[in-house]
Amino acid sequence: AGEQDLAGRHVVISAGGTREPLDPVRFLGNRSTGRQGYALARAAVARGARVTLVSVNSELADPAGADVVRAGTAAQLREAVLKAAADADAVVMAAAVADFRPAHYAQGKIKKQEGAEPEPLALVRNPDILAEISADRARPGQIVVGFAAETDDVLANGRAKLARKGCDLLVVNEVGEHKTFGSDANEAVVLAADGTETPVPYGPKDALADTVWDLVAARLG
Ligand code: C5P
């Protein structure tokens, strides 16, 4: 503790969950609160980094010492992350990003038509921000970290996802109705592109954050 091993580094962290609007009052969203990303931001500040936190629909208090940028949708998150990542040493995508968004946005509130069946909801794919920044590093040696919440075959799915996304580290955890989201604790395995696996026992999100920065700092050299 107290080690300034990220001094002089700029790190970018996304936290929270995207909301994709259907109309002015409705959205497709998820249960992410931003706790893990905010823990990562606090830990990085404590280790001396300059921190840009891209906060996505989180109600948590701004972490002291971090630059906080806000985004709502996946498109806004992508723009904010790409901009901040331009001079970043590490990018950690802890936000839960909607894979799909409504194909159409209704300018006025969608109304139910008396006696009629509802319209099917048409969706289109969102860009995969993590895959994009991994494939197209803004600077050489930039470390990119993703998170993957899995409900089954956690390790096998995690390894496949690490390869597919092309990031350096993937933090994999098992989620369920009462696990991870909104909780202060987490249990995870950090998979690295070099094949190493770092299990993180059930514990506070602050502890997982420090393990992630240990692995990032080691790779920044
Ligand atoms: O594919 P999946 O959604 O499980 O991947 C999760 C990881 O990918 C997270 O790090 C998340 O922030 C990132 N992601 C992204 N853009 C998307 C979907 C996920 O950057 N459209």
Image (tube, helix red, strand yellow):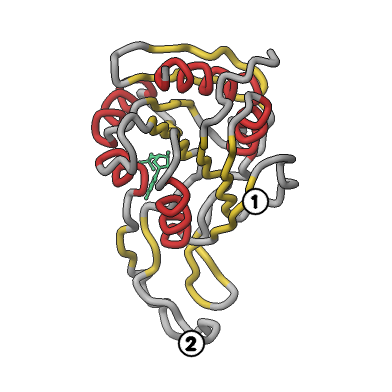
Q: Nearer the viewer, residue 219 or 147?
A: 219
Residue 168, image x and y in percent?
34, 26
Q: Residue at x 41, y 61 (%)?
A: 75
In this image, 178 relative to 94: left or right? right
Q: Residues within 10 Å of mark 2 (few under 14, many from 20)?
A: few
Ligand 1 within 8 Å, label 2 CB: no
Which residue is under mark 1? 58
Q: Residue at x 39, y 12 (%)?
A: 197
Q: Image quadrant of residue 117?
A: bottom left
Q: CA distance from mark 2 to mark 1?
A: 34 Å
Residue lying furthest front: 8
Badge 2 element: loop
Quadrant observed for ligand 1 in the rendered image:
top left
Which residue is under mark 2? 113
Q: Residues within 10 Å of mark 1 (few under 14, many from 20)?
A: many
Quarter of the image with the N terminus in it = top right
Residue 6, image x and y in percent?
56, 25
In this image, 161 relative to 37: left or right? left
Residue 187 to residue 164: above or below: above
